[in-house]
Amino acid sequence: MHSVPALRRYNPIGAVHGGYTAILLDSAMGLAVHTMCPQGSGYTTLEFKVSFIKAMTETTGIVRTEGRRLSFGRRAAPRGTHRRFARAPAGARHHDLPGVRAAQG
C-alpha cells in the first residue's frame, strides 16, 4: 500500500498526525489477515499498538506500508508491520460473519 502525507494530515505541532500512520498500519494488517480468511468469515482487531520511530511530514514522499501475517487461527492472528516511520504489532481474531455461511473446505 502506498500513500503520500500532505499538509491536510498535519497535527497542531507541525507533523503528520499519528492517526494517519495508524490508519495505514491497521489497513495493512487487515489486508494481510483478510487474505487468509475463508469465504464467509472475517476478522476483528483485538489490539493495536503503534511505536512511532520518526515523524512524517509533507516532504517525506511516498510511504510504503506492508502487513505480514505471522500466524493465523480462530483464537488470534497476530502480526507485525515494520516500517521506517512506525512499527505496529497487533492481534486480530478470525470469525464467521453474521448471516453468511462459511465455505466448506
Image (cartoon, rainbow, N blue to C red):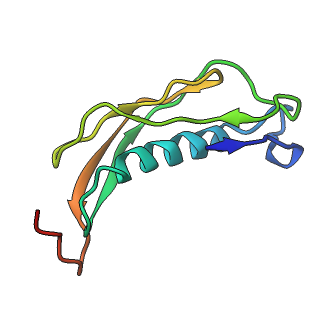
| Most distant residue in the bottom direction | 99
Position above or below: 71 against 31: above
Query: Measuring 79% from the left and 45% from the top, which residue is drawn there?
Result: 9
Whether 88 is drawn above or below 23: the answer is: above
Residue lying at the far left of the rendered structure: 104
| Drawn side of residue 99 relative to residue 10, left or right | left
Q: Residue 40's image quarter?
A: bottom left
Is residue 100 shown left or right of residue 28? left
Q: Give the tally of numbered discs.
A: 0
Q: Nearer the viewer, residue 55 or 62?
A: 62
**Location of residue 55 by image quarter:** top right
At 76% from the left and 29% from the top, the residue drawn is 56
Residue 52 higher or lower than 102, as above or below: above
100 horizontally vs 18: left or right: left
Foreground of the two, 14 or 101: 101
- Counting from the top left corner in percent of width and height, residue 26 is at 50, 44
Specify the quadrant that holds the C terminus.
bottom left
The answer to which of 68 and 78 lies nearer the viewer is: 68
In the image, residue 44 lies at what x, y percent?
33, 54
Quadrant of res 57: top right
Left or right of residue 29: residue 94: left
Residue at the location (27% across, 40% down)? 77
Please name the residue shown 66% across and 37% down the image: 18
Q: Residue 66 at what x, y percent from top left? A: 53, 35
In this view, the residue farthest toward the front is 105
- For the N terminus, the image quarter is top right
